Amino acid sequence: SALAVYRAQVQQQLSAEITEGTGVSINCSHPNIQSSEVIYWYCQLLGRGPAFIALALKGSKELQDPPGWLSVAADCRSSAL
């Protein structure tokens, strides 16, 4: 049997500067996503490893930590936190 290796092509803004206490939307484009793939969001602070935030297949869900929303576009080719 053959093993297929798939590398997602993810495009995301490199940085954002906001005032503490202000809401921000972080957008992510993943145009080559397959319909069966799950979208995972992580946060990585300087000097630390990635910390899991949320996952989604489609639609929107409210998050508790950090408080906010994770939304996936209807075609699943982009998401926003």
Image (tube, grey):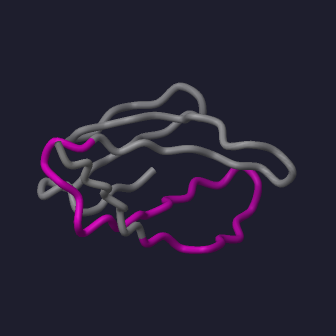
Front-most of 70 and 4? 4
- Horizontal placement of 45 versus 66: left or right? right
Residue that extends furthest to the right in the rendered view of this protein:
47
Residue that extends furthest to the front in the rendered view of this protein:
1
- Horizontal placement of 48 versus 75: left or right? right
User: Residue placed at 70% from the left, 49% from the top?
Assistant: 44
Residue 17: within the magenta?
yes
State which quarter of the image contains the N terminus. Answer: top left
User: Residue placed at 42% from the left, 40% from the top?
Assistant: 69
Front-most of 32 and 25? 32
Relative to residue 66, is residue 23 depicted above or below?
below
The number of callouts visible is 0
Residue 29: within the magenta?
yes
Relative to residue 45, is residue 67 depicted above or below?
above
Residue 46 pos. (x, y %): 83, 54
User: Residue placed at 12% from the left, 58% from the top?
Assistant: 75
Residue that extends furthest to the top in the rendered view of this protein:
64
Relative to residue 11, is residue 79 depicted above or below?
above
Front-most of 17 and 15? 15
Relative to residue 30, is residue 71 depicted above or below?
above
Residue 68 pos. (x, y %): 49, 39
Residue 18 pos. (x, y %): 70, 66
Residue 76 pos. (x, y %): 20, 55
- Horizontal placement of 78 versus 52: left or right? left
Report the predominant secondary structure element of the magenta stretch: loop
User: Residue placed at 56% from the left, 58% from the top?
Assistant: 24
Segment tinted magenta in the rendering: 11-37
Front-most of 2 and 71? 2
